[in-house]
């Protein structure tokens, strides 16, 4: 979990990362569910930006996380994350690219 938390801590404001992306950065691209579990059980004292981790389609976490999807959505909106009409994040506009955090995905 330490590697997952280290990677998540680096996601900058205004960007998001996917569970699968974080799993791949940890060296195990098939471990997206493990990343989800880690986000759900992240220690509060680490103050991780877990709200910036979403699924590959840009869907938000289940309602029981963050106290409801509306809370995660509001946190992301405050950071300037764009949403589509279907309620999903526009991943192409805000996906974090490690080492290139200022660059947008085309």
Image (cartoon, rainbow, N blue to C red):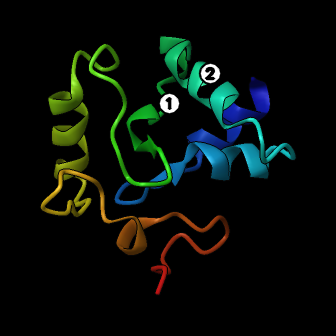
Q: Quadrant of the N terminus?
A: top right
Horizontal side of 54 relative to 70 (left or right) equals right
- Residue under the point 34% across and 59% down: 14
Give the number of the mark in front: 2 or 1: 2
Residue sitting farthest toward the right: 27
> Residue under circle 2?
38
Q: Residue 89, how many percent across, how many down?
A: 30, 57
Along the polypeptide, which appears first: circle 2 or circle 1?
2
Q: Is residue 68 above or below residue 72?
A: above
Q: Secondary structure at mark 1?
A: loop
Horizontal side of 27 relative to 5 (left or right) equals right
> What is the C-alpha distance between the residues marked 2 and 1?
11 Å
- Residue under the point 26% across and 59% down: 81
Marks 1 and 2: in contact by CB < 8 Å? no
Q: Badge 2: how crowded within 10 Å, few (<14), some, or many (20+)?
A: some
Horizontal side of 35 relative to 3 (left or right) equals left
- Residue under the point 54% across and 24% down: 39
Q: Which is more toward the observer, 46 or 4?
A: 4
> Residue under circle 1?
48
- Residue under the point 51% across and 13% down: 45
């Amino acid at each position: 979990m330490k590697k997952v938390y280290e990677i998540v801590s680096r996601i900058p404001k205004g960007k998001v990362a996917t569970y699968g992306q974080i799993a791949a950065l940890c060296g195990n691209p098939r471990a997206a569910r493990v990343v989800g579990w880690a986000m759900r059980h992240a220690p509060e004292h680490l103050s991780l930006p877990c709200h910036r981790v979403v699924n590959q389609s840009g869907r938000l976490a289940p309602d029981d996380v963050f106290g409801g999807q509306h809370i995660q959505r509001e946190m992301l909106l405050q950071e300037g994350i764009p949403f589509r009409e279907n309620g999903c994040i526009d991943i192409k506009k805000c996906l974090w690219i490690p080492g290139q955090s200022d660059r947008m995905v085309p």
